[in-house]
Structure formats: C-alpha cells, structure tokens
Image: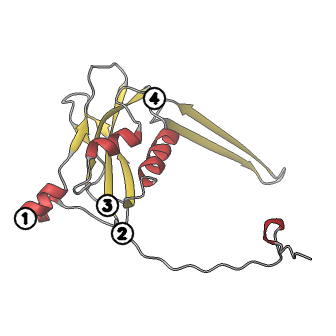
C-alpha cells in the first residue's frame, strides 16, 4: 500500500581493508490506495467490461502486483493488441488527478488534440470508475489505455510427431 518512499543512502569505502559499508534509510511515505480508474481507447468495445476485467476498485490498497495482474487479465480478453496502465498522483489541494506525462510509454500515442472526427472521438471516450468516498490515504489514479487488435485473424501452423502413441497403434485381425 506504499506507492512512494524516500530513500537516502551513503557509502563508506575502505580501500585498504577492501570493504564497503552501505547504509540505506527508507521512509515509506503515506499509505496509498487506488483512486479513480479510467479507460480510453476501447473503440466500440464496452469499457465497463474492461474495468470489470481489471478488478481494480478505487479505495483498495495500492499494489504493483495488482496492476500487473490487471494488465494481464485485460490483455487475456484477447481483443487488444496493447494494454498499458499508467499511474498518477492526486493533488491534495485541488483533488485533481495529475500524470507525469501526456505521452504514454507504449508503442502508440493518443493525442486528444488530433481527434477531430466524430468517429475518432467516439472511439476514445473516457469511462471512469470513481472514488465513492473520501479517504485520508494518498490516492493513486489510474489510466488504462488499450488499443484494439484485429478481431478476426487467420493463421497457418504445422506440426511434427515422432513415434507412435498407444492410442494410434493399428490392430490387425488375424
């Protein structure tokens, strides 16, 4: 549940004794919970299903492993070619969600300023699961960015078998 920490360190090296003394001081920071969870880029697919598949609910304790599990569950819906979950911070004074950068770290970028057609605007509607109550814990808002893949794919495969399995032996009638 601790999404941010302050870490200070020092190193003392003794060349003659060939030793090093390393000291780290970690201050865990505030206990954090998931804040507002938003989905965009879902095209014509229901955003509520993506939120449901993520299984991330605002108010639950923050966990990096929960984020990775959510990404995996959304990707396993097998309709997206890319799934990215971006964490942010909630400004304690204004309550506004802030993200480090408008640029996503994945292979693609979505820029709302470039969306001018109604089809593009409809495909990038934001749907959010909001925080229902105030909490004294630090809130970590999430943005789930998905990129729909091809719904229909054709593939060709090949196989190779060496030996004979018991169920494949021929029985000869004498």
Instruction: Choose between 8 and 162: the one closer to the eye.
Output: 162
Would you say 170 lies left or right of 13 here? right
| Labels 2 and 1: the sequence-earlier one | 1
Locate residue 65 relative to residue 145 in the image: left or right: right
Q: Position of residue 16 (x, y in %)?
A: 83, 53
Q: How is the image coloured?
A: secondary structure
Mark 4–mark 1 Cα distance, whole angstroms, equals 44 Å
| Residue 157, placed above or below residue 118 | below
Q: Nearer the viewer, mark 2 or mark 3?
A: 2
Task: Report the residue marked by disc 3.
Answer: 147
Which one is closest to the eye, mark 4 or mark 1? Answer: 1
Q: Earlier in the sequence, mark 4 or mark 2?
A: 4
Q: Which mark is residue 117?
A: 1
User: What is the C-alpha distance between the residues marked 3 and 4?
Assistant: 34 Å
* Residue under the point 79% across and 66% down: 167
Q: What element does badge 4 sit on?
A: loop
At 40% from the left and 42% from the top, the residue drawn is: 53
């Amino acid at each position: 549940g601790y999404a941010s920490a302050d870490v200070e360190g020092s190193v003392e090296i003794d060349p003659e004794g060939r030793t090093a003394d390393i000291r780290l001081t970690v201050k865990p920071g505030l206990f954090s919970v998931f804040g507002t969870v938003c989905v965009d880029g879902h095209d014509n697919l229901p955003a509520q299903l993506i939120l449901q598949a993520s299984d991330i609910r605002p108010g639950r304790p923050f966990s990096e492993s929960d984020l990775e599990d959510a990404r995996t569950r959304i990707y396993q819906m097998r309709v997206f070619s890319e799934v990215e979950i971006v964490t942010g911070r909630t400004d304690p004074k204004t309550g506004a969600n802030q993200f480090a950068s408008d640029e996503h770290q994945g292979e693609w970028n979505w820029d709302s300023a470039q969306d001018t057609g109604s089809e593009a605007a409809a495909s990038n509607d934001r749907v959010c699961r909001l925080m229902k109550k105030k909490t004294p814990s630090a809130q970590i808002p999430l943005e789930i960015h998905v990129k729909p893949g091809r719904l229909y794919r054709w593939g060709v495969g090949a196989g190779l078998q060496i030996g004979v399995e018991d169920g494949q032996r021929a029985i000869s009638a004498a």
